[in-house]
Image (tube, rainbow, N blue to C red):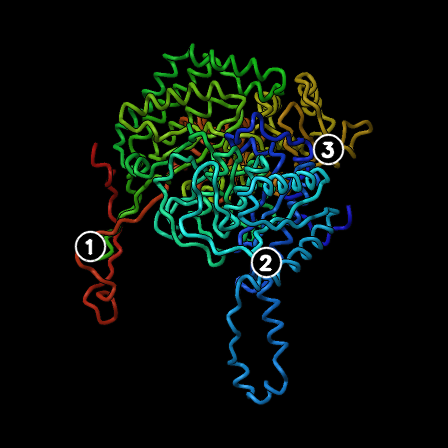
Amino acid sequence: MADHTIEMSDETLKNSIYSLCTVPNGRAHGGSFAHRGELRQAKRIVVKLGSAVVTRGDECGLALGRLASIVEQVAMLQNQGREMMIVTSGAVAFGKQRLRHEILLSQSVRQALHSGQNQLKDMSLPVLEARACAAAGQSGLMALYEAMFTQYSTCTAQVLVTNLDFHDDQKRQNLNSTLQELLRMNIVPIINTNDAVVPPPEPNSDLQGVNVISIKDNDSLAARLAVEMKADLLIALSDVEGLYNSPPGTDDAKLIDIFYPGDQQSITYGTKSRVGIGGMEAKVKAALWALQGGTSVVIANGTHPKVTGHVITDIVEGKKVGTFFSEIKPAGEFICDMSIVDFFSTFCCTSRSEIICQLAELLTEKKEEILAANKMDMDLAVSHLPPAMLKRLSLSPAKLNSLAIGLRQIAVASQDSVGRVLRRTRVAHNLELEQITVPIGVLLVIFEARPDCLPQVSALAIASGNALLLKGGKEAANTNRVLHQLTQEALSMHGVREAVQLVSTREEVEDLCRLDKMIDLIIPRGSSQLVRDIQRAAKGIPVLGHSEGICHVYVDADASVDKVIKIVRDSKCDYPAACNAMETLLIHRDILRTPLFDQIIDMLRTERVKIHAGPRFASYLTFSPSEAKSLRTEYGDLECCMEVVDSMQDAVDHIHKYGSSHTDVIITENEDTAEQFLQQLDSACVFWNTSSRFADGYRFGLGAEVGISTARIHARGPVGLEGLLTTKWVLRGDGHTAADFSEHGTMKYLHENLPNMIFTTDTNM
């Protein structure tokens, strides 16, 4: 391939590599695709470029940058073995630019001088007839496409059509034959209506049934062409994100992800775009006609500078971009009804506690059903999941009993959670201020193969009055389904079944992270890679979590032998895959070549822990273990790094440099040294003479946790019920105004602290 003049983005490159690994096969049996994920199989694709996409904002000339990005994507897909066709606008705009230029040049110098400079500035150009503009612009438009595609060693061909080419059987067959031959030769057809000769569209002649479609604009042309050529996918790019339930920009306008033909009555259309002769209504009609003919359709934005460079490839990869038209009515798609959220947030504490207790009872009563579903997941996963993941996936009677106990603790804690007064202040006479706890709103918790997370997080959300969306790993699909059914059964006792929803559709995590108008907080539970991916993908939604669990245990010179062996073994070996497991063991220099050091090494060998030597530790040894590739590694297995430090302060400096602010431990009998360590170290959890494995919501007495946060705002460490609450300020006055407290006002601020009452908002107690 020739050197590109346009740099390929990382995202586009990633998509291209992925697609190269999956050869598109096209549709089976001639039907449209039912789900977005199936769009990866699209073999023959029509890309329709609306006038607003191709033309500049002044409607005179082409948007060359946008066009170049689109050409890059089309060429990439073509070179992957797909058959690409483009239906383009732009001839009129390109011709208008050329004709205006010619008119200005044709003005004689004498006339310009005679008219005077001021009159020349005010001179208006004549109105240009659209057909003349099209005739002048077609050749230039095609030359531009040809030059751009040549950069990618891709050949193009121009095809101009009119309505008669589709309504006359012979002409239609000729057109079909021509396009088939071009595709066979790996040529990209560039298709447009022959606007130089086409008559004006007749009113109300747009779409007249399955067999007839009037070519009145490029929307209808693209639809007719896609059906005629049996295309798998039609991508219609415009200047809006997709189809909205009401005109974009109006109150409560919501982008429709999947549009089902039976939902047409729920749409209110607005005006058409700034250019072109079609509007959203014409696009929808054309899309539905194509869908009925067996072609899948996506309407998306081709003008947004942040997405134009990968919008086409994103659609083909099945990502949630624009509106996907499907003949299958969306089923099982989560619906976060804000009325449910508002109602649930004001639930009385007794009702919330009853729901959680009922869920705890169901975990015990339905134990056999849960374990049977979990066995199905284990049987499917045993062949491909590593042992650490299998341990997370596995449930047992003991685990379920522990879950039930934790849920009952949460039920008790929920009694005084929402509506608790944190501060009361008498600002002035008859002017009182309160700060009270309130739910955050809607939580999205994404977790991997750990089904025990579902009831824990559900109980915490219920206790804190938050609505909850859950996205679990596919490895635990059967277990999650049963646990979610039990959760909704418990919620049904107070009529709030939909307050906790399990996202079981094909939404990718990245798509969920874009729902900034629906979701208030994202909490990832899983590997460090998952957390990092979520933090990168989240757009405008805060993420609570930690990207790594690089936990240290520092063995001081004054440490007790028995405590060291016990704590180090538990921190590393109790559950190596946990985020609170020890990953680096720091040894005081004075302990080297002592019996304590030998006992530590013997214990780790007995437990089959692989040791990676830090650079200083390796320098002390003649024959050292394998040297650590990095001092900042989360092994998540029976492996750890061992390093030598000169002092407690040296250990603190090492942890600040290489740690992740998760959990760090000192083992020492020197109280002064321990207190300095606890005060100086800036981690979410700092322990003295105890295992790092205690960094857990259940062990802290929180009942459970939604995760461990290493952030420095909102919540830190194991995040339980308190971490899922925020506050609001309530001010009660009696006609007070700020002017009353001005220099010439009649009132003065008191700012007196008042004793707190327990609740202000829970009126149903």
Amino acid identity at mark 3: Ala
Q: At numbered mark 3, what does the secondary structure look like: helix, strand or loop? A: loop
Label 3 packing within 10 angstroms: few (<14), some (14-19), many (20+): some
Location of mark 2 (residue): 91
Q: Residue 139, relative to residue 211: is it above or below?
A: below
In front: label 3 or label 1: 1
| Quadrant, the N terminus | top right
Q: At numbered mark 1, what does the secondary structure look like: helix, strand or loop? A: loop
Place of residue 444 in the rendered image (x, y in percent of width and height, measured from the top left) = 44, 35
Q: Label 3, label 1: how many angstroms apart (C-alpha)?
A: 64 Å
Q: Is residue 320 visible?
A: yes
Badge number at residue 628: 3
Badge number at residue 733: 1
Q: Going from the N terminus, do you reach mark 3 or mark 1 first?
A: 3
In the foreground, 550 or 189 = 189
Who's the residue at 45% across and 41% down the image?
515
Mark 3–mark 1 CB contact (< 8 Å): no
Left or right of 753 in this view: 166: right
In the foreground, 483 or 72 = 72
Who's the residue at 46% across and 38% down the image?
288
Q: Going from the N terminus, do you reach mark 2 or mark 1 first?
A: 2
